[in-house]
Image (spheres, rainbow, N blue to C red):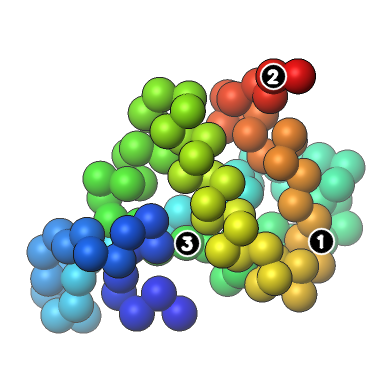
């Protein structure tokens, strides 16, 4: 679906994977798998293709380890891009829970 392009910025390139001879990317579960047991996700799997995004290694590290505002912006942008696919897979988007799973508390 991502055509070997980073889903944050499709101009990000890394190196050619010797296995695919395409741009190297890493898979990232947008809604973290640690939420699978949560009440919201107990009856539906979140380990589905709609929840897996392709990221260049730099953006993959950034979504985990950067400052809160950068992470939040990345997560919201990716959720907006994936909203329809996630809903078709039966996955409910609860922004507050998802952000909390990344260590981001929403401010009122």
For label 3, the crowd category at 10 Å Cα-Cα, with few meaning under 14, some 14 to 19 and many 20 or more, is many
Instruction: Write down the quadrant of residue 104 in the picture.
Output: top right
Q: Do the residues labelled 1 and 2 touch (CB within 8 Å)?
A: no
Q: Is residue 98 visible?
A: yes
Q: Distance between the residues labelled 1 and 3?
A: 18 Å
Q: Give the image quarter of residue 20.
A: bottom left
Residue at which label 2 appears: 107
Question: Does residue 77 lie above or below 17 as drawn?
Answer: above
Which of the two marks, 1 or 2, is nearer to us in this view?
Answer: 2
Q: Is residue 8 above or below residue 59?
A: below
Q: Is mark 2 on a helix, strand or loop?
A: loop
From what the image shows, is residue 107 above or below residue 45? above
SS at circle 1: loop
Q: Earlier in the sequence, mark 1 or mark 3?
A: 1
Return the mark for residue 53.
Answer: 3
Residue in the foreground of this view, choosing between 79 and 36: 79
Question: What residue is disc 1 on?
Answer: 44
The disc label shown at residue 82, or none: none
Q: Nearer the N terminus, badge 1 or badge 2?
A: 1
Q: Which residue is drawn at 50% across and 40% down?
A: 73
Rendered-image quadrant of the C terminus:
top right
Distance of mark 1 from mark 2, alpha carbons?
Answer: 28 Å
Name the residue rendered at 32%, 59% in the picture: 9
Residue 5 or residue 90, whichever sits in front? 5
Q: Contact, CB < 8 Å: mark 1 with mark 3?
A: no
Locate residue 48 relative to residue 17 in the image: left or right: right
């Amino acid at each position: 679906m991502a055509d070997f392009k980073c889903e944050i910025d499709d101009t990000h390139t890394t190196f050619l994977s010797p296995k695919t001879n395409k741009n190297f990317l890493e898979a990232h579960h947008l809604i973290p798998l640690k939420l699978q047991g949560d009440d919201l996700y107990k009856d539906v799997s979140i380990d589905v293709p709609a929840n897996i995004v392709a990221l260049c290694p730099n953006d993959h590290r950034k979504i985990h380890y950067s400052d809160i505002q950068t992470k939040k912006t990345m997560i919201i942008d990716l959720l907006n891009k994936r909203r329809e696919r996630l809903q078709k897979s039966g996955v409910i988007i609860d922004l507050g829970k998802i952000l909390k799973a990344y260590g981001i508390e929403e401010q009122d």
